[in-house]
Image: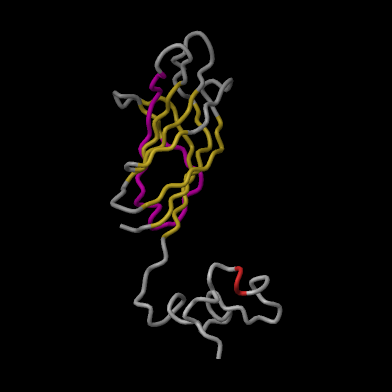
């Protein structure tokens, strides 16, 4: 199971069931990745074809295989109504890295088609940890002199070492 960051672009929906009899529906989406839940803005006045164009970021840190989208309709005078849901398998995103905005079927509790929701996905894996013996995090021998080193011609980090969170107190010593 890869660890990293999942970025979800909630684009729009089409053909949603309008269950608000008195007016256009005001939908929003609850996005759930295991125990993490995010809520989109409520879209008013667009009826059954809302556009969100919102981005959400989740941390992938344990065994996660799917993203769950639950579309709700905001009601001012009663409990919000369930419109439909979509479940997106994350296996392809872990191998591909990104999936452009794609339409997924929205279904109700009886698994009947209730429209579609368009979502784009991008997964950024965490850098793999090594034993510290070599490579990017282990030694200061790269072309930029490693992290925290201020030996460029104009002071690459914009000034003295003291202002950068304890570089001067680090175990690195100039030769």
Reply above or below: 17 against 77.
below
Q: Position of residue 172 (x, y in %)?
A: 50, 82
| Placement of the N terminus among the 4 image quadrants | bottom left
Q: Quadrant of residue 35?
A: top left
Toward the viewer: 31 or 129?
A: 129
Judge whether 116 appears above or below 147 on screen. Answer: above
Principal secondary structure, stretch drawn in magenta: strand
- Scheme by which the image is coloured: secondary structure
Q: Residue at x 29, y 23 (%)?
A: 110
**Residue located farthest toward the top when viewing the structure as drawn:** 22
* Quarter where residue 145 is shown: bottom right
Using residue 110 as the reference point, say whether residue 100 is left or right of it: right
The verdict on residue 84 being magenta is yes
Percent of width and height locating residue 114? 40, 24
Q: Is residue 153 left or right of residue 53?
A: right
Placement of the C terminus among the 4 image quadrants: bottom right
Q: Nearer the viewer, residue 4 or 118?
A: 4
Residue 89 on the magenta segment? yes
Q: Is residue 92 above or below residue 51?
A: below
Q: Residue at x 47, y 80 (%)?
A: 171
Whole-percent x, y for residue 28 in the image: 48, 28
- Measured as percent of width and height from the top left, residue 105 is found at 40, 33
Say which residue appears at 58% left-offset and 68% top-offset.
Answer: 164
Magenta segment: 80-104
Residue ranking furthest to the bottom: 175
Which residue is nearer to you in this view: 4 or 47?
Answer: 4
Judge left or right: residue 4 versus residue 42: left
Count numbered badges in the picture.
0
The residue located at (34%, 77%) in the rendering is 131
């Amino acid at each position: 199971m890869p660890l990293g960051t999942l970025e979800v672009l909630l684009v729009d929906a089409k053909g949603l069931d309008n269950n608000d009899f008195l007016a256009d529906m005001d939908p929003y989406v609850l996005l759930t990745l295991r125990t993490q839940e995010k809520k989109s803005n409520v879209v008013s006045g667009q009826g059954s074809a809302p556009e969100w164009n919102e981005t959400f970021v989740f941390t992938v840190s344990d065994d996660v295989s799917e993203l769950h989208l639950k579309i709700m309709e905001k009601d001012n005078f009663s409990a919000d109504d369930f419109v439909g849901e979509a479940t997106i398998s994350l296996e392809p995103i872990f191998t591909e890295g990104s999936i452009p905005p794609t339409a997924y079927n929205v279904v109700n509790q009886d698994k009947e088609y209730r429209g579609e929701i368009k979502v784009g996905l991008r997964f950024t894996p965490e850098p793999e940890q090594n034993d510290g013996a070599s490579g990017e995090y282990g030694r200061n021998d790269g072309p930029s002199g490693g992290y925290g080193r201020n030996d460029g011609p104009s002071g690459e980090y914009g000034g003295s070492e003291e202002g950068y969170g304890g570089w001067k107190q680090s175990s690195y010593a100039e030769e």
